[in-house]
Image (cartoon, grey):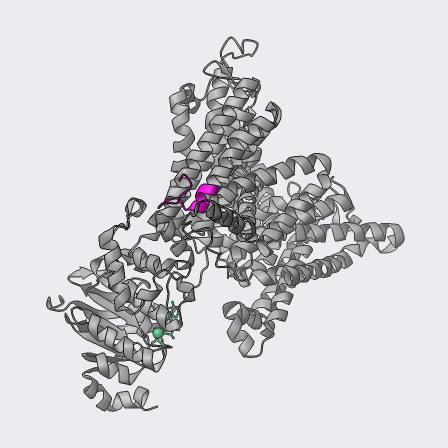
Amino acid sequence: MNARPDFLLSVENLTVSFDGFKAVDGLSFYVEPNECRVIIGPNGAGKTTVLDLICGRTKATEGKVEFKNQELLKMREDQIVHAGVGRKFQTPTVYEDLTVFENLEISYPKGHGVFGALMFRRDDPVKTRINEIAGEVFLDDLLHEKAAFLSHGQKQWLEIGMLLIQDPELLMLDEPVAGMSVAERKQTAELLNRIIQDRSGIVIEHDMKFVEDIATRVTVLHQGKVLSEGSMAHVQADPKVIEVYLGH
Amino acid sequence: MFADYTMGELGAIFAMQGFAGLILFSVFVLMALGLAIIFGQMGVINMAHGEFMILGANVTYLTSNLFANYIPSLFSIYFFLAMILAFFVTAALGMLVEWSLIRHLYKRPLDTLLATWGLSLILQQVYRSVFGAREVGVTIPEWMMGSLPLTDLIEIPINGIFVMVLAVGISTAVYIMMFRSSWGKQVRAVTQNRVMAGAVGINTERTDRLTFGIGCGVAGVAGSAFTMIGSTGPTAGQLYIVDTFLVVVFGGAASLLGTIASAFSISQAQSIMEFFLSGSMAKVLTLLTVVGILMLRPQGLFALKLRK
Amino acid sequence: MLLKGNRFFSTSDLVGFAILAVLIFVILPVGLDTFRLNLFGKYLTYAFVAIGLVLCWGAGGILSLGQGVFFGLGGYCMAMFLKLEASSPEATKIQSTPGIPDFMDWNQLTELPLWWEPFHSLTFSLFAVIVIPVVFAFIIGVAMFRRRVGGVYFAIITQAIAAILTILIIGQQGYTGGVNGITDLRTLKGWDIRTDDAKVLLYFVNGALLFVCLFIAQLIRKSKLGRILIAMRDQEDRVRFSGYDVANFKIFVFCAGAAFSAVGGAMFTLQVGFMSPSFVGIVPSIEMVIFCAVGGRLSIIGAVYGALLVNLAKTTFSELFPELWLLGLGAVFIAVVLAFPNGLAGLYKDHVEPRLLALFKKKMGDDGSAEDFDAIKTAAE
Ligand SMILES: Nc1ncnc2c1ncn2[C@@H]1O[C@H](COP(=O)(O)OP(=O)(O)OP(=O)(O)O)[C@@H](O)[C@H]1O
Ligand SMILES: [Mg+2]
């Protein structure tokens, strides 16, 4: 069966097994353009693994992942990025030895071949764009600071900024507010709401308050399978979900 | 090329060649076992592994002199004591090295490589100053000389059999220690997650030090066994290092069975090719094949799927 | 002002380049006799390798223990040309087969092997000096980096390759000159390379080529590619998800390092007059790493000083106290890892340069941009 063309991303029967252990098991879900999908589930449910599979970090055992009618499972990580999928890791990963500016510059979508990188020039459009993004993720004062000196929350923002500058059509964020203070959380929720406007997102989050703020639809994962799917209100009322996840 | 031989002679040649391959196999296994612990289980690259073997050989040499001069009546069994001594002396040095050098570098594998190379240079010079630059050979006891005639064409050297028996014995011991004892579980727990292992009450520092020590000790025993089939010079350790690492890597670093299988295939390939080609070309072809296969299958023969 | 920084050279880089240029082109040639100068020329050929290692290892995190392979291949290509020129039928008429290199004759070869033929041509040989090592590095790089082999495994495999090539060269003495190597090289297109004048000229050519390589390395470091290398060393996965094909970048620096080493090897042959497997194998290859580490694995200028210093020490000590040398070298390996991970460049950066810059600033009110890659400390604690 072919995926419906009006979906931006369709995941079908996605399965990965690590030495017999199925971390993701026959998973299917669909993401529409401009939708913000939140994936929740208990620890070890396979949430991070789903993102790993979509962005090519882990090779799937079987299944299909179609993004704008391209089969992602056959592509390399960098090709998937160029197709328009951006990924933020669960623990913030930024280039600690480089400045905030250089971190963003590396993510700027130009000069990605070896020779392109050699010839790359820091011209005005590049600088303008970097400044713009830095402003958006609250880091405009820290542009020339080494990333190693940023706080945990600021590193999270920087990583989001690095995704934004790629201007992906699908943003995948793994626990973007984990480890943030209450004030930072609020700021981040606003930020995410803003940047998700004209694109789609898949967000993994444990913070229910936050999920309510941003989710269009919610998918609950449990042991690698979809336990429940629908609006926030729908899944919150689902007795199965209450039992395995929300209940405690 | 076979035309000049009768069937019987050919059979004998193959049998002897096969046996030579088995001795080489035992040598490889002995060389690689210590490294399979240190590199395979702990992930430490010890470039001075060969020098630890030479230390074992030198301890054996000293013991044999001691027996010859002071208790010649027991000379025929000195070797067993020598092996035990070799184990403890090299293990002690290994623990010292772990304490002074390696433990600072667990997060920097490439730097460990350079530091242990430095260590190997220092040890080589020490051996040269103490034992002289020439190769030393030990006098092997009477009963180990000569060979067992299997048929009137096939003869098997006794010291070769002895090395093979040792290889089997020590591999079994290492296997039981690393994979069948609670000690081995601790070692694996520590290497997989140091912080977590510490949190559940394992003394990670002690585990690291002892594991490294035991790996070195096993190298020492290997060195000791080698004195039975050849002589050793101060720089001989350097000759072993590439072979040893390739055996371990080719087997799939974390698997003991892999190490043994890889020692077997490399040694057999080499001794079979040695029959057709000159020694150096056989060596080149064997190493080239191993490197080629590793390029195609970097995880080695036996590999686990691990989370990055 | 001359020493004002720009996009590719910060002020401190310019100062470093200038000091090195004065040392190589003025102080050494004026201060040393031809014999010593030639010796320093030989040391400087190792600096080519060390610069390549700064790019691969210091910046990119790829430790190759097989740089001797590329140094050797470059050197052998040069040596083959010179040997053929030295083996004209007239010069070798006492051999049983005149016109082929002496070692072939000793090994009962009666004909020049086919693969030696192209090395009659200087153009081909110069071409081969660079292309053969680079193609070889490319093949290794593609095989390993495409399969994401890196770190320790890469180090071990490159070391094995160095071992293999040495055994091969020694084993095939009829074709390669065996353990003695290719010796008794005389002229380059009729120009005698053994005279004092030639040695001085070659020293300067070597110095100039070294600066070309330094310049290229600096451009690479200061381009976005240089920053990607650092990013890759620390967070390889993140670089992939910033949309880069990491393998290509690794292959590129590995090839660049091979090309630098090969130029060094060829200049070694020209200045020293022979090439042998003792510059190819495991031991020389790992010593080349220590030149780089002593200089400071992140600094290309430091790499040059590292090569000079370690080799000078080696010559001095191994003549005076042969026993101490190995102990000393061993200790250097350990010290540079445990105590001085940034080598000479780190010491310079921390202690000398601040004073130097202060001096300059007082003199001419320069702005001295602080942005600099040398300052980056290794991820190592
Ligand atoms: N490469 C791998 N090899 C073996 N097991 C793996 C691998 N990747 C993931 N797993 C296992 O798959 C399961 C799902 O892991 P995953 O990280 O996707 O969970 P998660 O839902 O993101 O949990 P958390 O909320 O804690 O982040 C876990 O049990 C994990 O140990
Ligand atoms: Mg997760």
Q: Is residue B6 above or below residue A150?
A: above
Query: What residue is at 79 percent from the left and 48 percent from the top?
Result: B142
Secondary structure mostly seen in magenta is loop
- Whether residue B216 sits left or right of residue B144 in the image: it is left
Query: What residue is at 89 percent from the left and 53 percent from the top?
Result: B70
Q: What stretch is highlighted in magenta?
A: C1-15
- Whether residue C140 sits left or right of residue A56 in the image: it is right
Q: Was residue A164 drawn as part of the magenta stretch in this picture?
A: no
Nearer the observer, B245 or B152? B245
Q: Is residue C115 above or below residue A35?
A: above
Residue that lies at the very extreme toward the right in this rendered image: B70
Q: State how many labels appear.
A: 0
Q: In this view, does B15 lie above or below A217?
A: above
Residue B42 visible in image: yes
Quarter of the image for the N terminus of chain C: give it.
top left
Q: Was residue C7 drawn as part of the magenta stretch in this picture?
A: yes
Q: Return the x and y of residue C108 as percentages of the image width and height.
A: 55, 19
Q: Return the x and y of residue A202 as percentages of the image width and height.
A: 24, 72
Q: Return the x and y of residue B83 as percentages of the image width and height.
A: 73, 57
